[in-house]
Image: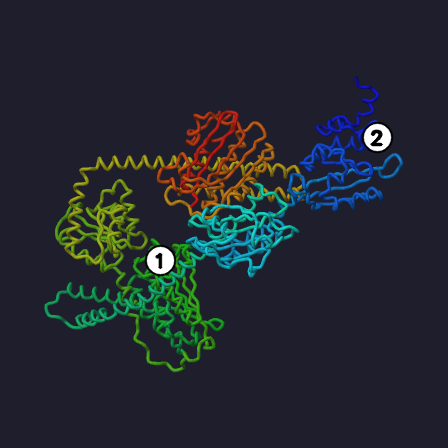
Amino acid sequence: MTDPTEQTTLEFLAGGGEMGRRIREFDWNATALGSPRDWPQSLKTCIRIMLSSKQPIWIGWGQTLLKFYNDAYIDIVRGKHPHALGEPASVVWKDIWKDIEPLLSRAMERDEGTYVESRLLIMERSGFPEETYYTFSYTPVLGDDGRPAGIICYNTADTERILSERALKTMQQLDSLGEKKQEDEVFTQVGKALSANSLDFPFAVVYRISEDGEHARLVATSGVSRDDDRLDADVRLSEPAGHYAQLVSTVQQNRMTEAINRGHWKHLSTGGWDEPPKYVVYLPIQSASRKFPLAVLAVGLNPYRKFDEAYRNFLQQIADRIALGLGNVMAYEEEQRRLRVLEELDKAKTLFFTNISHEFRTPLMLMLGPLEELMSHSVPGWRDEDKAKVEVTHRNALRLLKLVNTLLDFSRMEGGREHARFVRTDMGAYTRNLASSFRSVIEKAGLEFEVNIDSDTGTAYVDRQMWEKVVFNLLSNAFKFTLNGKITLDLRAHEGRILLSVRDTGVGIPAEELPHMFERFHRVQNSGGRTYEGAGIGLSLIRELLGLHNGTISVESTEGAGSCFTAVIPQGKAHLEPALVSEVDPELDEAISDLYTTEAESLLAPVGEEGEAHSPRDYQAMDCVLIADDNADMRQHIKSLLGNQYGVLTASNGAEALGLIRKRRPALVLSDIMMPEMDGIALLKAVKSDPAICHTPIILITARAGEESRIEGIEIGADDYIVKPFSSRELIARAKAQIRMSTERHRITDELERKVEQRTQDLVNANRELESFSYVASHDLQEPLRKIQTFIHLIERNNFDSELSKSYFQKIYQAAQRMGELIQSVLSYSRLAQNGEATQQVDLNRIIDDIRVDFELAIEEKHAVLITENLPVIAANPLQMNQLFSNLISNSLKFSTVQPEIRITGSRQMGQDIPLALPEQADRAYHHICVKDNGIGFEPEFREKIFSLFQRLHRRQEYAGTGIGLSIVKKIIEQHEGFVSAESHPGEGAAFHIWLPVS
């Protein structure tokens, strides 16, 4: 039975867990300390403090510093426990005695305390020397005689922090790899980053692997020079020697391998240590598009660090980062190659335009000459309609010549072969003369034409033919898009520049189109105007011509109110090459105004034509044909072919035609595709979508040849499709056939009505799908909105000027920004089933880091732990990956009753090992990501049902949610050609398995 007096005396040893028990049971009488009841009071006090503390503490007492320590200190002594108890400090820490003995002597001999922060100590605690870092202090403890009798040491372990900071610094230096444009830049940065961390990488060597896996080329080193004789610059992998056999093995297996450091590399470099690496690890830099790795990184491992999972993951992250950098370089190089191909195609196109335009001019001249002879002489027996046909032919030949000349001008500009002749010119007189050529055709169209030229405009050096093209193109453009009102030409001099403005009251230009008006081949879609015809190069040609004069052009416009184009050129000749300047007026070139005015006149419809029906006999509504074309000559030509058999209506654009169809109900519509205001496609859709006129047959007429164009016309709903040029017999035959079929269609109205009902149901289904997107938004945007609300509440309770408030505002901003990204992801979700979203290299570690920030409050509130291991870099859509893992992590947090632990791990699997894969996918490699939690789980019978839309396993009162999160997860994975499955039991948590293809 314990003596009550002795029990009271030993109360200082009470408690203390395992070490308290061991100290009480230890035979101290066999040591110099003797019985605990006789120990000095200062030692008893220190032991009481040590046993009651949660901080690692050890006490050394007496001249040999016999060792006491608490439970928290066991992790420091590790393999030396429990034998370290009662042993002298010099015996316990003989491996670091040279480092700590001077500090202990200062405490014992001089009564001076010491404090050391993050001290490197190479300890042998588990059978091998180990790199450790500790912050500790030695405080002398006085005995009964007032002299130091021992020390007490407080310890803080810094090893994990130091290693993590070192790894983070290395990864930050590798972040810039994604910005590199060349492979050499990537490998140079890799060498610099690894050289800066010589403790974890005593040496590193990078070999670039050929695509066939037969050769390796040295591209980067760390800790050793690339010129070192022990490194081969080129290695033939089919005939490996020595340590390069491991390099071959890594290339062939395309996975991480390890080897003992021996041979030439054994003393390659010790890095920051006094011992060489004992092992070398070979990491393949992988690419999903190649059988063999892009490169192999060989790393000499830290001799004082265990090659554990953290070290392995660190190396794998480096390999993944290098792979990402090389992947970006390869993508950039491919983009550059495509740009070069496009440049070559552009040059070939320009050359083609030059050649084909020259080939066109010869037959055109042979057409125009005889036509002009016919028009200038009276031909016996000619009727007025014969003469009209010749005039139409001549007019359109001139239009074709204008287009050919424009293409030639443009090709010369592109090829740098356009040379200007700058002549001193009276700009006012010359421009007024040019403008007068257009007055007749403008006023004939019922428009007012105003020309304002300042009397003091003066002279400028211009290429007259080029200036002529600038003026005529601007006036022609204004005339084409002005149906009423007026066109105004202003010319004035201002601050040494000539300003030419052409203003109209036409249809105007949409604001979003203004930045593109001077781009090659750009045309405003479905704009109003007299015609849609044109090559789309007139304004870009003007810009190029003015550029040769060191001038510019700009546009101002309001849709529906008109436009103003302003050309500016400098006066004087200082900006021009002297060899190209002339003071004397040469003989004027032949005017080209006829080409522009003739084209403009062709846009004017003959008086009384539009909307009128012409027929030699009475006709019923079903005998009427409507012709819609913006070219008056084409309308007149088709009317001449059909007018003898049917009544004919004409319209110059789709909008006018649609009104006539609704009013007159023609039996057939012949429509050009390219028309202003409303084109033929829009007209077709408008007619077919109107139940009252949807049965009206429509034949589309286009200049696009080829079977594909014909199929496209039929697919968009046209009843027939005719390609220009067409024969008269073909047009008449097709018109008759469509009118006959129109009668037949009336007998199958009931069937069409049934199809309309089916389409209506399809629209209902589409609306339901749109409704589901609102659920997606409410589901995935709850978390950032909750953060916003919470931080606003916290701000209201705190001083707005404090740093804490500023921090809250910053978090609100970041949360709102992420919410915007989620909204964009939801909007793009609706396009997945049709086109898919562009993929890029996505680091899942970064995705999880972003989600960790998004769910910061929920994680802190539930004291949750989120662990990631071996997450890969994959080809995916980043926003969808964020949404996918956000849904899974949100579910894990939501369906938990105790402290949640969410573990996300990654690995690789072949399709043959995946239960959900098809036989043809057996040889394909997949990333396997597992999201596992310790939540409430669910019954196994629901493992497939939980992915159904709106599927809930719990009442809303128990757990909030919409029941669509997992269905979105499945949809995203399917869009990435992957698989997902779930497994769980009630009370045992849930595991979601995701497989995404490596490529």
The disc labelled 2 sits on which kind of residue?
A: Trp
Coloring applied to the structure: rainbow
Q: How many marks?
A: 2
Q: For the point 43% across and 35% down, which residue is it?
A: 980
Name the residue that disc number 2 marks. Answer: 39
Quadrant of residue 610 within the rendered picture: bottom left
Quadrant of residue 596 within the rendered picture: bottom left
Q: Which numbered disc, 2 or 1, marks the residue closer to the eye?
A: 2
Above or below: residue 100 compared with residue 598? above
Above or below: residue 484 compared with residue 862? below
Q: Nearer the viewer, residue 549 or 856?
A: 856
Q: What is the x, y in percent for residue 792? A: 60, 38
Q: Nearer the viewer, residue 735 or 429?
A: 735
The disc labelled 1 sits on which kind of residue?
A: Arg
Q: What is the x, y in percent for residue 789? A: 57, 37
The kind of secondary structure element at disc 2 is loop
- Screen quadrant of the N terminus: top right
Name the side, left or right, on which 554 lies relative to 29: left
Residue sitting farthest toward the left: 381
Q: Nearer the viewer, residue 726 or 524?
A: 726
- Give the number of the disc on residue 773: none
Give the class, few, some or many, for how many residues have Cα within 10 Å of label 2's Cα (few <14, many ≥20).
few
Name the residue that disc number 1 marks. Answer: 523
Q: What is the x, y in percent for residue 828? A: 43, 43
Mark 2 or mark 1, earlier in chain: 2
Q: CA distance from mark 2 to mark 1?
A: 100 Å
Q: Nearer the viewer, residue 326 or 395?
A: 326
Residue sitting farthest toward the right: 145
